[in-house]
Amino acid sequence: MARGAAQASRKRAKPEQKRNKRVTPAYEQTMFFPRLRRQAKWVFVFLALVFAVGFVAFGVGSGSTGIGDILRGNFFGGGSNSTSSRIKDDQQKIAQNPQNIQAYLDLSGIYQQQQNNAKAIVVLKQAQKVAPKNLDVLNQLAGVFRGQAEQARVDAQNTQIAFFDGTVTPPGLDTSSTLGQALSSDPYSDSLRTKANDAYTKMVTAYSKAETAYKDVAAASKGTSQEANSQLQLGSAAELAGDSPTAIQAYTRFLRLAPDSPNASAVQQSLARLRASSAQTQG
């Protein structure tokens, strides 16, 4: 009887042990990575949400700089709205006060950043009428013309190189002979020659405009600390424009004002070359 009672007691106890085994979590279930695997889908949902918010808030991958850009209307590269507002603001300042030279300079600077030199020149010309001797206006205007002249010089050099590369004549051939003229007067060579001549003419015209602008700077800067530099710029522009007398006069004035300048040696060489060339022309 006692043995039967003990066996019955053990049989009843077994289901309870199984139940306890299911209720108590195994050691490996309390580890970090298994729990992370069970909850992974919720973690990924959370990360996706964070990335989406970050994309909007900080402009990740959009080219903007975040909420500040959104508030300024610059999200997804909408920076032109800010530039347009700056242009309108400067135009309004000028309309309210035509004597506001700084507004002209700022507006011209914006146009130059946009590589719209035509509008920049118009604005600076307006400022020049208001303040004919303002050196900031005159220097900025001359700088625009000088930039255009430098670009024209590069274009002229490139077209000249293309002309020489495309019209190579045999060594020793006289280009003035019938054969030489025939080889150098084909339609393709004529086209390259025309382009080179046109580019050279544009360069000279551009430097002539720069020379005129620097003449205004030199006149306005007379007696000031900026005179030496303006004479140097004038001489350089005049030399490239083919105006030797003006270049010689400007370089001479520069050496008188700044004999110890680091540019003095180069200017002296230019003067010697210009004077020699002028003497040959007059002779």
Image (cartoon, grey):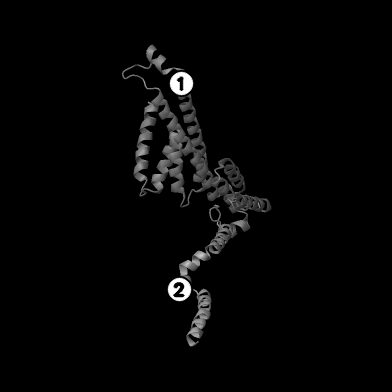
For this orientation, the residue located farthest to the bottom is: 2
What amino acid type is highlighted by mark number 2?
Tyr
**Number of numbered tags placed on the structure image:** 2
Q: Nearer the viewer, residue 176 or 204?
A: 176
- Position above or below: 225 against 238: below
For this orientation, the residue located farthest to the left is: 172
Where is residue 281 drawn, in percent x and y?
39, 27
| Element carrying mark 2 | helix
* Identity of the residue drawn at 38% across and 13% down: 179
- Residue 27: which numbered mark, if any? 2
| Element carrying mark 1 | helix
Where is residue 165 drawn, in percent x and y?
39, 26
Which of pointers 1 and 2 lies earlier in the amino acid sequence? 2
Q: Nearer the viewer, residue 166 or 78?
A: 78
Where is residue 261 drawn, in percent x and y?
37, 49
The residue pinned by badge 1 equals: 188
Q: Nearer the viewer, residue 253 or 196?
A: 196
